[in-house]
Amino acid sequence: FIQKLQSTNVLSENDWQKWNLDAIVDLVEGSLMNPVHMNFALAKNEKFFKKILNFLKPGPPGSGHFSTLGVGSGGGEWVNINSHYTIVRIGCGLLDLLSMCD
């Protein structure tokens, strides 16, 4: 589990484009559904959640937050539709996980 958490690159990279989105989805929809893993992640690696939630929160244009990204193939702050969909899956999965916590 710890290896999976580290393979996401969330803890080591500030740039979301360097994160392994597929590994994050695997964690959110898999390992973190286990209460033991979820409690460990919240207690020992809260930075993981803070960084992802900070990226997902609304932000001003140019901030690099998810809400400011366009969908398409342009340069700069644009992401392809598959990455956009994956990020939405991560956000929804995190909300589900956090709503199950006591």
Image: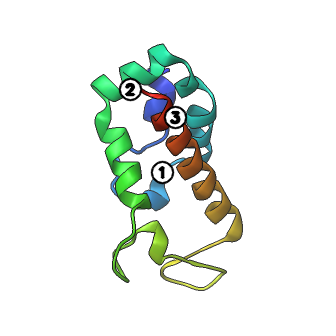
Question: Which callout, 3 or 2, points at the residue further toward the start of the chain?
Answer: 2
Question: Which callout, 1 or 3, points at the residue further toward the start of the chain?
Answer: 1
Q: Where is residue 30 in the image (x, y as percent from the top left)?
A: 63, 28
Q: Position of residue 98 (x, y in %)?
A: 45, 36
Q: Distance between the residues labelled 1 and 2?
A: 17 Å
Whether tag 1 and tag 3 are in contact, CB under 8 A, the answer is no
Badge 3 crowding class, 10 Å Cα cut-off, few under 14, some 14 to 19, many 20 or more, is some
Residue 36 seen in this snapshot: yes
Q: In which quarter of the image is residue 34?
A: top right
Q: How far apart are marks 3 and 2 (CA)?
A: 12 Å
What amino acid is at disc 1?
Answer: Trp
Callout 3 secondary element: helix
Whether tag 3 and tag 2 are in contact, CB under 8 A, the answer is no
The residue sitting at 46% across, 14% down in the picture is: 36
Residue depth check, mark 1 versus mark 3: number of the one nearer the observer: 3
Tell me, for residue 77, which label it has, or none: none
Taking depth in this image into account, of 79 and 46 the one nearest to the observer is: 46
Point out the residue furthest to the right here: 82
What amino acid is at disc 2?
Answer: Ala
Badge 1 crowding class, 10 Å Cα cut-off, few under 14, some 14 to 19, many 20 or more, is some
Residue depth check, mark 3 versus mark 2: number of the one nearer the observer: 3
Q: Relative to 73, is 43 above or below?
A: above
The residue sitting at 69% across, 69% down in the picture is: 81
State the residue position of label 2.
41
Asked if residue 23 lies left or right of residue 15, the reply is right
State the residue position of label 1.
19
Q: Position of residue 51 (x, y in %)?
A: 34, 50
Asked if residue 91 lies left or right of residue 83, the reply is left
Tell me, for residue 97, which label it has, or none: 3
What amino acid is at disc 3?
Answer: Leu
Residue 11 seen in this snapshot: no
Question: Which callout, 1 or 2, points at the residue further toward the start of the chain?
Answer: 1
